[in-house]
Amino acid sequence: GDSVTQMEGPVTLSEEAFLTINCTYTATGYPSLFWYVQYPGEGLQLLLKATKADDKGSNKGFEATYRKETTSFHLEKGSVQVSDSAVYFCALSVTGNQFYFGTGTSLTVIP
Amino acid sequence: DTAVSQTPKYLVTQMGNDKSIKCEQNLGHDTMYWYKQDSKKFLKIMFSYNNKELIINETVPNRFSPKSPDKAHLNLHINSLELGDSAVYFCASSQGGAGTDTQYFGPGTRLTVL
């Protein structure tokens, strides 16, 4: 079945460090891939998405490239800020009515 | 303007009680969802409705009953609450059923069953 595997956290980084959160997927069709972010006490919000192979999604300095050959959608940011502290979820959807979320990776950025 | 709103934000109740959580979206979306997030942040879909029709009903106890009076609302009623129902429940909506659609989430309802 369809699923997402996400690197486990928590991740703690110093401000301005490079961030990578790994995400790999299994899908029977041609999924769209998403990264959602959840700030403390809030609901999830879309960070970026890619709808086909080789697409790169980007937003707020974050980016992820849809790699069909490695079934991956790793999230990267070159220089994290304290305000990036949140839980990050990788997700996929084949039909749209059904989303599969990863287990979430908690990121804490310290000054 | 709040795109997806849920009420209440916090709900504390005793085992065995019946409670409801309400969700409304003002985005004009056709599809709405309920998710459960456990204490480890694991997020799992419970239900999905498209234009008031049930599309997805995951293996959720039948104590949980969603109701969609119109496509802007999807309420969740829970009968005979159990300790294991304690979680944060998120409502979400999306434009349609396409795999490319972004989901918009509400702020969540933290349910605590004592």
Image (tube, coloured by chain):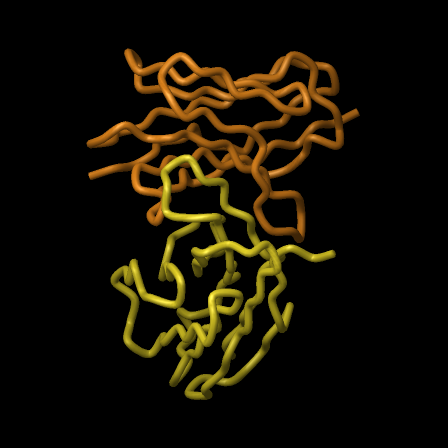
Visual hue assigned to chain A: orange
Q: Locate residue A21, reporting x and y percent.
A: 50, 23
Q: Is residue A56 above or below residue B85?
A: above
Which chain is represented by yellow in the image?
Answer: B
Q: Is residue A100 left or right of residue B107?
A: left
Near-viewer residue (A7 or B19): B19
Q: Quadrant of the C terminus of chain A?
A: top right
Q: Residue at x 25, y 37 (%)?
A: A2
Quadrant position of residue B81: bottom left
Q: Residue at x 45, y 56 (%)?
A: B30
Near-viewer residue (B34 or B112): B34
Q: Is residue B72 left or right of residue B97?
A: right
Q: Quadrant of the N terminus of chain A?
A: top left
Near-viewer residue (B50 or A43): B50
Q: Locate residue B7, reporting x and y percent.
A: 62, 71
Q: Is residue B92 above or below residue A91?
A: below
Q: How many marks?
A: 0
Q: Residue at x 58, y 38 (%)?
A: A37
Query: Furthest residue to the bottom?
Result: B17
Q: Residue at x 29, y 72 (%)?
A: B61
Q: Is residue A73 above or below residue A92?
A: above
